[in-house]
Image (tube, rainbow, N blue to C red):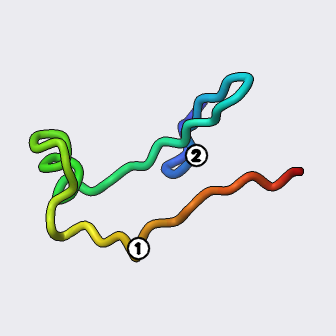
Amino acid sequence: MDQPQRGIRAAYGDSTITVYQAYSPEIGLPAVREGRFPAVWKRDRMTWTTKAWS
């Protein structure tokens, strides 16, 4: 079966949900190497995930 090009990757437990975000090499590689996001990364482009239940 073919894998979709895009998808949501997540892991969950009884009390937490971790959603994984993919970044372009321009952002991801320096972030891994330096332990922080490079200047080209912009916080205002972040999308926040919130719970949809009460």
Residue 4: x and y in percent read 55, 45
| Pick the front one: 42 or 29 | 42
Residue, far right: 54
Specify the amino acid type for callout 2.
Answer: Ile
Residue that appears at 68% across and 23% down: 13
Residue position for label 1:
45
Residue that appears at 49% across and 49% down: 5
Q: Residue 35, located in which quarter of the rendered image?
A: top left
| Pick the front one: 17 or 21 | 17
Residue position for label 2:
8
Q: Nearer the viewer, mark 2 or mark 1?
A: 1
Residue 41: x and y in percent read 25, 67
Residue that appears at 12% across and 50% down: 30
Marks 2 and 1 close (CB-CB < 8 Å): no
Q: Residue 3, located in which quarter of the rendered image?
A: top right
Quadrant holding the N terminus: top right
Residue that appears at 30% across and 72% down: 42
Residue 26: x and y in percent read 16, 59
Q: CA distance from mark 2 to mark 1?
A: 18 Å
Check disc 1 and report its element: helix, strand or loop.
helix
Q: For mark 1, does the 10 Å Cα neighbourhood hold few (<14), some (14 to 19), or many (20 or more) residues?
A: few
Q: Earlier in the sequence, mark 2 or mark 1?
A: 2
Q: For mark 2, does the 10 Å Cα neighbourhood hold few (<14), some (14 to 19), or many (20 or more) residues?
A: few
Check disc 2 and report its element: helix, strand or loop.
loop
